[in-house]
Amino acid sequence: MEISLAGWSINRRFRDKENPLPLLDYPKTATEEFGISLLELNSPFFVYTDSDNPATSSIAKGYLDDLNARARDAGARMINIAVDGHGDLAALNEQERKHAVENHKKWIDACGTLGCNAFRANSGGGWREAPTDDKIGQCIKSFGELSELAGKSGIHLMMENHGGVSVSPQNIVRVMDAVDSEYCGVLADFLNWPDEDDKLENLKMVAPYAWAIHAKFLSFGPDGESPEIDCAAALKILNENGYSNPYGIEYEGKTDDHEGVLKSKALIEKHAS
């Protein structure tokens, strides 16, 4: 059993206006502070040639080599990248959709350079809007095109339950079945579902397609358990569906992130052993 750390768990440090944590320091922070050496990166925290337009600009020259060197020095390994803000892959306007696909292509090469086996793209379709069949169709087209390109480099494209088209497990399964590629899978987040949904039932639906997970917890009781989701039940669902990749921590609580990550780690270790 391996545990990975999603960089978003400490997003407040990366986004601190006075003293932001550079992404280059993330490998050392993860290994020394949390004892975790498998890392998920987040596109907003990279350095770009045009910081005002990261979607359309390149990653700064030499930056990926520097990041590789920092990871190597820390004894860390980068396994995937969560990509945000690169366009609407479910846009009804075909030119807009194609631009979004083009914007995401650079992450295939970035994954290859960094040794990551996957990147996550948002499904598109608007954050709070009810996805229509037309938008789902555009999303299928985009994920099909990107996964075909990524697969040529042995890179997986992942869809996370993250709003838009991916607001429901039924939509996610529909996209996965339509794309039908071994290089297109799911980044299954424990909590990113509508409040009224049964999160374990949703996980059951997407678990057969899971390439990665976000074991997300917001708070912890005196017994170390999270009231938001039954961790033991969630891990059992994943195990029953043959999931064997790392258990990824994504702490999103409002309290201290150091404590939140370590409590998340302890909870996963308690039920995954």
Image: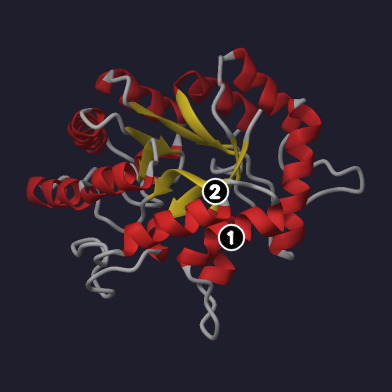
Count residues near mark 1 (Cα–Cα under 10 Å), then give few for <14, some for 14-19, many for 20+: many
Of residues 56 and 70, which is closer to you in this image? 70
Separation of residues labelled 1 and 2 (CA atoms): 8 Å
- The answer to whether the residues at label 1 and label 2 have Cβ atoms under 8 Å apart is yes
In the rendered image, the quadrant that contains the N terminus is top right
Can residue 227 be seen here?
no
Q: Residue at x 54, y 48 (%)?
A: 76
Q: Secondary structure at mark 2?
A: loop
Mark found first going from the N terminus, 1 or 2 = 1
* Vertical side of 231 occupied by 258: above or below: below
According to the picture, the residue beneath numbered tag 2 turns out to be 76
* Vertical side of 158 occupied by 106: above or below: below
Can residue 72 be seen here?
yes
Task: Give the quadrant of residue 193.
Answer: top right
Picture coordinates of residue 121, whole percent (x, y): 34, 44
Q: Which mark is residue 224?
A: none
| In the image: residue 132, left or right of residue 214 | left
Q: Residue at x 18, y 33 (%)?
A: 149
What kind of residue is marked 2? Answer: Ala
| In the image: residue 213, left or right of residue 168 | right
| In the image: residue 67, left or right of residue 132 | right
| In the image: residue 52, left or right of residue 269 | left
Of residues 123 and 150, which is closer to you in this image? 150
Picture coordinates of residue 117, whole percent (x, y): 39, 35
In the rendered image, the quadrant that contains the C terminus is top right
The residue at the far right in this view is 222
Q: Which mark is residue 28?
A: 1
Of residues 164 and 239, which is closer to you in this image? 239
* Vertical side of 84 occupied by 249: above or below: above
Q: Residue at x 37, y 47 (%)?
A: 114
Picture coordinates of residue 245, whole percent (x, y): 54, 27
The residue at the far bottom in this view is 18
